[in-house]
Amino acid sequence: MSSGITLSAATRQNLLSLQETADMAATNQGRLATGKKVNSALDNPVNYFTAVGLTDRSTALSGLLDGISNGIQTIQAASKGVDAASSIVKQMQSVVTQMQSNAATNLPKLQGTAALGTAAEATATGKSRHDVAVSKKIVGATTPADATTAGIVGVDATKVDTFQLKAGTTVTNIAIGANDTVNDLVNNINKSGIATAAVDSLGQIQITGTGSDTLTVSAGLLDGTTGALTADATELAKLTGGATASAAGGTSAQRSALVDQFNNLRTQLDQAVKDAGFNGTNLLNGDSMSIAFNEKTGSAQSKLQMQGNALSSSSLGLGTFVDSSTAQAGANFGVQNNSDLTKASDALTNALASLKSVSSTLGSNLSTVQNRQTFTKEMMNVLDTGAANLVNADMNAEAANSQALTTRQSLGISALSLANQANQGILQLLR
């Protein structure tokens, strides 16, 4: 103060104290208004720039959360698609089970018409016609059964030594020995795997295929070198009681009615898989997806790269059903063919296993992304808290300081007033 006005030392001291108090009050009011003790690099360069770095990283992680959230929804959409596909496959299994429930009606049957055990023989032996038939020897001169003789069917050994079964591409040769009985032949047919045989209560033989392919039987001499059979229809008629040499599988109307149901479910499976996308990405359609977990780039970036699976009924090995008794090639199935129904059942079981594998992979990736989402949120909280600790003001302390500075300012003004009282006395003397 070079104004030429002379102030006492006490007055000058009180004025300086009031100026300091005013400066401190201004700083205090700024902290109360902003909530920060460091508002710029001028306040504290180290704390300011450190807090800016922490805040910038938290902001970058916040931007990544949107991508992580979209990734979670994309995986969940794919998982729902797998669940829907699995449910449809189980429905398809139910349809195939219904198709298989009437398998017997589709089996080819050869039925003898002439009894191998007659009513007269049953009376003579005191046995049933069935027991008479199965006890007879096959080869030799025709001999009726009586009380002392089992009887002989009458097949000529010079013309027949083999009974042959053929279904599809499978051929089974059954050797007929000199002492073989009808019961031996029945047992050997049952062991063949492609047909079963039985003698009914009328003494007639019945041969049934185990599959839907046309069943053909022959009897004759087998060439041990070439494997060719010289068939004799007359001797076959004796052996089978006049049964036809060939029979095709039957046709089931129930199975025919289920063809469209199965094929429609197959279409629904394909549609469900195509609809399992989210925001333009479908992991069940072979799409890929990358989810970034940190703000870095290049090799320093943490991310999850997912390659989807191109799922469809075809990729799962599920072809279409055809109303046919002929075995179908590839993944297709003939509904009237029992072997194809078994193939369809196996294909559906394998499809479910494949879908479970895809579901497991999606579940594992979903868990990974969800864990990183939680970690990112917690990391953002750590960064924001760290930045706040560096620059935020202690509001409790600043509030107390505000009260103290107000009191201090009042006391300073009072002190300045007291310091000026001496000058007031001199003024009174001058009056």
Image (spheres, grey):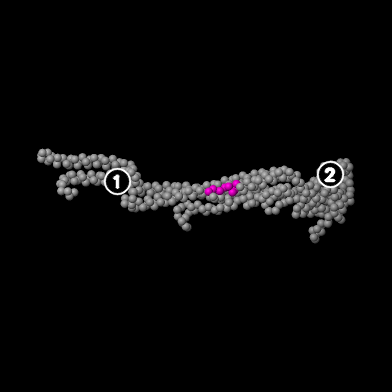
Task: Choose between 22 and 103: the one closer to the eye.
Answer: 22
In this rendering, would 354 be left or right of 167?
left
Q: Residue at x 55, y 47 (%)?
A: 77
Q: Residue at x 46, y 52 (%)?
A: 294
Relative image position of residue 78 (x, y in whole percent): 56, 48
Residue range of the region highlighted in magenta in the rendering: 272-279
Relative image position of residue 243 (x, y in whole percent): 83, 48
Q: Which mark is residue 27?
A: 1
CA neighbours of label 2 inside 10 A, class few (<14), some (14 to 19), many (20+): many
In this rendering, would 116 be left or right of 59?
right
CA neighbours of label 1 inside 10 A, class few (<14), some (14 to 19), many (20+): some
The answer, for residue 197, to whether it is visible in the render is no
Q: Residue at x 59, y 45 (%)?
A: 83
Per the image, label 2 sits on a secondary structure element best described as: loop
In this rendering, would 400 be left or right of 149?
left
Relative image position of residue 156 (x, y in whole percent): 87, 53
Relative image position of residue 154 (x, y in whole percent): 87, 50
Per the image, label 1 sits on a secondary structure element best described as: helix
Amino acid at the residue labelled 1: Thr
Amino acid at the residue labelled 2: Gly
Residue pointed to by mark 2: 203
Task: Choose between 217 and 273: the one closer to the eye.
Answer: 273
The answer, for residue 126, to whether it is visible in the render is yes
Quarter of the image where one finds residue 119: top right
Quarter of the image where one finds residue 431: top left
Which of marks 2 and 1 precedes in the sequence? 1
Instruction: From the image, give the main secondary structure of the stretch colored magenta.
Output: loop
Q: CA distance from mark 1 to mark 2?
A: 119 Å
